[in-house]
Image (tube, grey):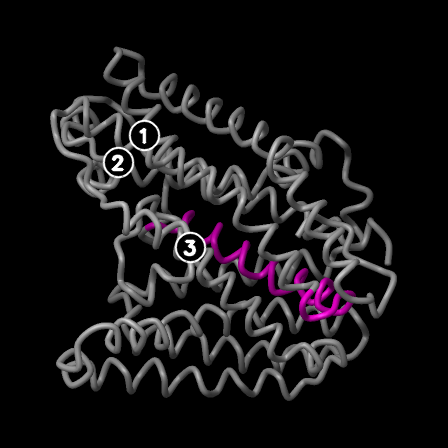
């Protein structure tokens, strides 16, 4: 495996990071100031935003396009890259490596969000909106969605999906290692889950917590994992175990299951904005995959910005939300123009993310890989040439 053949995924990781940050700092806070004001405990945010002359980034008439697009790219990249790790680690080693890949960086991002919210609430003369128990449930990640605990940072749901995908990979590790195409038939089970649980939500709701919360989780998280399997299908083709016609048929099945499940369950949107954005991300990923050899000849000035963003993409994702919003609104309150405030917020987010990358992400990731190597033998020598 060569570095040039994986370069397309690294490029797309940088694009995904840029799309999410642009969506939040250049679109969402301007389109939904009340929602963001509630998220960061800054009650005066809406008034500040409305008093500023700023044209948000276009969404092409598709609500929240860039946010959906960026997250969808991240999901596809994980679906493509994680099987490389699955194929080179034992089950215990893979679990340990993933835990140390996700939690240390996320805990810093959560602590930063909690600090910003506490500062904003204190400045507004309001009590801190979360209990210690709610912070703990967010910190544990996997306990947040099944308990319907409010999201503190607004981005935790994607990590919950990511972790469920890791668990799925552990269960189907043998099938992934052998590129067993029957794995993708499990996507057919997502449709009845997404349809039947909301249909019986009244009965389930009367059963109370935690049954309702677990049922809600079971009908939503697997929908996104179905989409992540699209990346895994690309991996099977990359390994030479799935023909191009087979890849096309598999992707058609997975996309159909994903879109149907997304639009018949709790996650349904009347304007179809999410499915459209996810399909757009799939098309971009697919085209880049087919042209992957061309990425090695791109000029450095094209690749470098995306490579830099890709390197810090996870810490950037973990810290950009509440922290970025807080910096932006306080810059506006201090009298800065909208574009300057957005630039200051983006620079602050990137600076913190870079520090977290070197001080937390890289050391914890390296330690995780070292532990994984000690815990269980590798089954192959090669690994992906991008961070995962």
Q: Quadrant of residue 26?
A: top left
Say if mark 2 contacts mark 1, CB within 8 Å.
yes
Determine which residue is flagged by label 2: 40
Compared with 98, 115 (above or below) is: above
Q: In which quarter of the image is residue 345?
A: top left
Tell me residue 231's x, y (percent): 62, 66
Secondary structure category for the residue under label 1: helix
Query: Closer to the camera, 225 or 33?
Result: 225
Residue at 26% of width from left, 31% of height from top? 118
Q: Quadrant of residue 88?
A: bottom right
**Left or right: where does residue 211 sit relative to residue 240?**
left
The magenta stretch spans residue 72: yes
Kindly report the distance in space between the C-alpha atoms of the residues bearing marks 1 and 3: 20 Å
Query: Closer to the camera, 60 or 351?
Result: 351
Tell me residue 281's x, y (percent): 52, 58
Which numbered marker is on residue 116? 1
Q: Give the range drawn in magenta.
A: 64-92
């Amino acid at each position: 495996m060569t570095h040039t053949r994986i370069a397309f995924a690294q490029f797309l990781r940088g694009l995904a990071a840029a799309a999410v940050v642009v969506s939040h700092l250049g679109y969402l806070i301007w389109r939904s100031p009340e929602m963001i004001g509630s998220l960061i405990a800054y009650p005066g945010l809406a008034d500040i935003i409305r008093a500023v002359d700023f044209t948000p980034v276009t969404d092409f008439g598709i609500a929240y396009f860039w946010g959906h697009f960026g997250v969808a790219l991240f999901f596809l990249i994980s679906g493509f890259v994680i099987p490389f790790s699955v194929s080179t680690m034992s089950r215990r080693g893979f679990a340990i490596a993933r835990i140390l890949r996700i939690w240390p960086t996320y805990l810093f991002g959560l602590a930063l969000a909690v600090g910003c919210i506490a500062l904003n609430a204190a400045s507004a003369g309001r009590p801190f909106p979360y209990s210690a128990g709610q912070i703990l449930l967010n910190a544990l990640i996997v306990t947040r969605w099944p308990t319907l605990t409010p999201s503190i940072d607004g981005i935790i749901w994607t990590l919950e999906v990511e972790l469920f995908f890791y668990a799925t990979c552990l269960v189907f590790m043998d099938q992934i290692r052998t590129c067993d195409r029957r794995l993708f038939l499990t996507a057919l089970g997502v449709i009845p889950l997404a349809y039947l649980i909301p249909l019986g939500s009244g009965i389930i709701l009367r059963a109370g917590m935690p049954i309702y919360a677990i049922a809600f989780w079971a009908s939503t998280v697997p929908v996104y994992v179905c989409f992540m399997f699209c990346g895994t299908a690309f991996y099977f083709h990359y390994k030479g175990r799935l023909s191009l016609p087979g890849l096309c048929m598999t992707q058609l099945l997975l996309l159909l299951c994903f879109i149907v499940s997304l639009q018949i369950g709790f996650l349904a949107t009347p304007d179809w904005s999410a499915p459209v954005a996810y399909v757009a991300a799939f098309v971009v990923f697919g085209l880049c995959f087919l042209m992957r050899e061309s990425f090695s000849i791109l000029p450095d000035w094209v690749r470098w910005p995306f490579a830099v963003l890709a390197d810090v993409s996870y810490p950037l994702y973990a810290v950009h939300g509440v922290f970025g919003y807080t910096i932006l609104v306080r810059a506006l309150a201090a009298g800065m123009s909208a574009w300057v405030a957005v630039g200051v917020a983006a620079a602050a987010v990137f600076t913190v993310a870079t520090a977290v990358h070197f001080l937390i992400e890289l050391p914890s990731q390296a330690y995780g890989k070292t532990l994984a190597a000690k815990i269980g033998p590798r089954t192959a020598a090669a690994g992906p040439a991008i961070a995962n």
